[in-house]
Image (cartoon, rainbow, N blue to C red):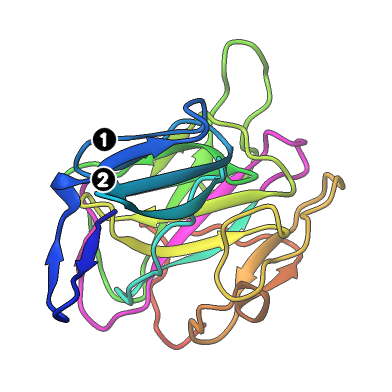
């Protein structure tokens, strides 16, 4: 925050560093001598600055909900198909990327991030160095088995990369980011997630061979860009590449 004083002659001056700062609720936020406000936890507090005999007041409401990711940038790589459960149950998951550009794209060190109801953002997988995805080609990430359970991906097409985090059937967010954290594509299930445009409905609790798959060009609207289909059609890097079958 800053303080600007207007004097009798109409002149103005930045008096931020000459002002005294006060906060009404130090459990919610603090304020430094230079006007920097630091949020501590959710709640409401007032920040007051006093210069000589004049005071200014601002109310702050701190929300502990993480901010949504920045808007995606068109990069050719899209989330093409995914499921949060399959015939093998709720561990039977995959995410398929696709290069819809007309040139190869180096996706080395790109990350697949996952969030459950916009909290606990974690990295599902980091793509290995030297990974070039040609036009119309796919990259498949599949759920691996963990020591505490025996469930995993059951599809016949092997994944190019595996991940261990179990995705929930609603409130799921899948976010593709570059190494510099630029968001490339994102998809979300229900209003509890991060999504583009309008979210997709819950995947549901039926353990059958189905998936959400992309249709047509990417419009940055999950609800319009994906449909539920059966059977699922996961495709890996060894699969066919085509820009004609969107």
Q: Secondary structure at mark 2?
A: loop
- Point out residue 69 in the picture as x, y percentages from the top left corner: 43, 57
Q: Is residue 106 magenta?
A: yes
Residue 241 visible somewhere in the drawing:
yes
Range covered by the magenta-colored residues: 84-109
Q: Is residue 204 left or right of residue 68?
A: right
Circle 1/circle 2 CB separation < 8 Å = yes
- Point out residue 44 in the picture as x, y percentages from the top left corner: 58, 42
Q: Is residue 203 magenta?
A: no
Q: What residue is drawn where x is 67% and y is 39%?
A: 92
- Point out residue 70 in the picture as x, y percentages from the top left corner: 39, 63
Report crowding for label 1: few under 14, some 14 to 19, many 20 or more residues within 10 A (C-alpha): few
Q: What residue is drawn where x is 33% and y is 73%?
A: 73
Q: Is residue 169 left or right of residue 146?
A: right
- Point out residue 144 in the picture as x, y percentages from the top left corner: 53, 29
Q: CA distance from mark 1 to mark 2?
A: 5 Å
Q: Is residue 216 left or right of residue 184?
A: right
- For residue 191, above or below residue 24: below
Badge number at residue 32: 1
Report crowding for label 2: few under 14, some 14 to 19, many 20 or more residues within 10 A (C-alpha): many
């Amino acid at each position: 925050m800053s303080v600007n004083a207007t004097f009798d002659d109409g002149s103005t001056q930045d008096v931020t560093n000459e002002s005294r700062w006060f906060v009404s609720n130090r459990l919610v936020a603090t304020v430094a001598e230079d006007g920097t406000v630091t949020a501590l936890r959710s709640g409401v507090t007032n920040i007051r600055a006093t210069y000589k005999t004049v005071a200014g007041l601002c109310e702050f409401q701190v929300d502990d909900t993480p901010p949504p990711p920045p808007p995606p940038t068109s990069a050719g790589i899209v989330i093409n198909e995914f499921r949060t459960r399959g015939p093998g149950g709720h561990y039977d998951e995959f995410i398929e990327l696709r290069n819809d550009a007309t040139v190869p794209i180096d996706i080395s060190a790109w990350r697949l991030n996952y969030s459950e109801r916009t909290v606990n953002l974690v990295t599902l997988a980091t793509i290995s160095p030297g990974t070039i995805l040609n036009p119309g080609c796919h990259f498949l990430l599949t759920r691996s088995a963990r020591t505490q359970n025996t469930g995993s991906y059951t599809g016949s097409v092997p994944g190019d990369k595996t991940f261990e985090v179990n995705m929930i059937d609603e409130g799921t967010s899948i976010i593709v980011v570059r190494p510099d954290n630029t968001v490339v594509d994102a998809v979300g299930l229900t209003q509890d997630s991060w999504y583009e445009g309008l979210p997709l409905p819950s995947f549901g609790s039926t353990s059958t061979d189905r998936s959400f798959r992309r249709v047509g060009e990417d419009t940055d609207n999950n609800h319009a860009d994906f449909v539920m289909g059966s059977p699922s059609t996961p495709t890996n890097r060894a699969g066919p590449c085509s820009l004609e079958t969107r």
